[in-house]
Amino acid sequence: MTTGLEHLRTASHTEATAFFADIDPEALVAEVRRTGDEELLALIAREEVRPAAVEGILARLHEYAVAERLADLRGVVRFDLERRGTLLERHGLVFEAGTMVLRRGLSATEPTDVVLRTSVLRFVRIVSGQLNAGLEYLRGKLDIDGDALLALAVGGIFRVPGTGEIAVDPTTLDPVEVATVLGEVRGEHLKKVMASGFRPIVLGEIFRRLPDFVDERRAAKADLTIGFRLLGNPTGEVERYVVRVRGGVATVSAGDAGEERDATVTCEGHDYLRLATGHLNPVTGVLKGQLKVRGDKAKALALSSVIDIPKPAR
C-alpha cells in the first residue's frame, strides 16, 4: 500500500490525532477512496488509530459537507459504531443552522433525535461519499432509531472532492439497486424501514421510476389501468397510486381521482416493494392473501409482466 494512510500502521494515538486534525479533508477522502476495505480494516483495528479517526472525521464533518445542505440540519444525532455487534465508539453531533458541535462519548441515556448504528468501516465509506446511506439502511447495514429523515439528511451532505456537488443523495434511489438490496433483507427489517420516515421516499422513487422499466414488446398492445392501495403507514394514511399502460408507455399518478380502473390491488407497503422489484410473485401473493385484488385479476397480474425491474443474476 502506498497511500498517505500508510504511516498510520505504526502511528501512536497522538500522531494519529494530529494526522486527522491536520490533513486536508479532500486529500483524506481521496486517500480513503483508493484504499481497499482490507487495508482500511487493518488500520481501524488499531486502538491507536480508530478513536482518532472517528473523532477527527466527526469534528471536521462540516469541511466535507455541502454548505447549503448542512445549513438545513437541526437536531442531535448519535453515532454508535460497532464491530460484529460490539460497540467501539459512541459520539454525538449537534446540528443547528449551519453549525455543528461534536459531543464526545455521548451516553446512551442522553436525549437524541436519532441514533445511527453501523460499522466503523461503513461509516468511513458513507462519509467519503462511496456508499448511499439510504440503500445501506434498506439493506440493514445501517440501523436507524428515531428521525430517519434527519439521519439520511446527514448521509446526504457530503460533497464530491474539489466541488460543491453532492457525492450521494440517499433520497435518490435506483430501482435496480433497490431490487438488488431487497434480495438480502430480512422481512422484519424491511417492515421497520417501511414504518419509518424513509417510507414515502422509497415508495415515491419506485413509482416515479416504474415507466423506465416497461417491456416495450409486451406493453405494445397492453391497455391496463391498475390502482394500488398501500397499507401500513404509521400515520394510518392509505397511500394511493394509479399505474396506466397504453400504447407501450406507462404513466403513474399519485392519489385517487376516482377514475375508472381495471383492478385495484391492496397490500402492505413492504409487500408492494417486494412485488415491484420481483421478490414477491404476484400469483403467490394473491394466494397467500398478501395481495388483495378487486376487479380484473388477470389484468392486475399482467402488470408485473409488462413492467419489470431487473435483478442481477446470482
Image: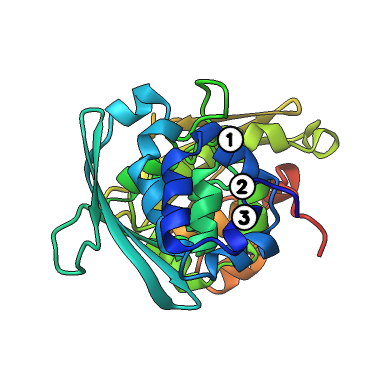
Q: How is the image coloured?
A: rainbow
Check the image and report above or below for 78 versus 303: below
Left or right: residue 105 versus residue 141 is: left
Task: Report the residue at 50% width, 67% height from top.
Answer: 290
Q: Label 1: which residue?
A: 27
Left or right: residue 42 versus residue 67 is: right
Task: Report the residue at 61% width, 63% height from top.
Answer: 9
Give the camera-side residue of 202 and 304.
Answer: 202
Give the camera-side residue of 298 and 185.
Answer: 185
CA gap, disc 2 to disc 3?
14 Å
* Picture quadrant of residue 278: bottom right
Residue 138 is tagged as: none
- What secondary structure is found at the residue carrying circle 1? helix
Give the camera-side residue of 2 and 292.
Answer: 2
CA gap, disc 3 to disc 1?
15 Å
Q: Label 3: which residue?
A: 7
Q: Label 2: which residue?
A: 32
Label 1 Cα neighbours within 10 Å, binned few <14 / some 14-19 / many ≥20: few
The amino acid at mark 1 is: Ala
The amino acid at mark 2 is: Val
Q: Quadrant of the C terminus?
A: bottom right
Which mark is nearer the camera, 1 or 2? 1
Of the numbered discs 3 and 1, the one sitting upstream in the chain is 3
The amino acid at mark 3 is: His
Where residue 87 appears, as percent x and y from the top left, is: 38, 74
Task: Report the residue at 33% width, 44% height from top.
Answer: 59
Where residue 54 appears, as percent x and y from the top left, is: 41, 55
Check the image and report above or below for 65 versus 56: above
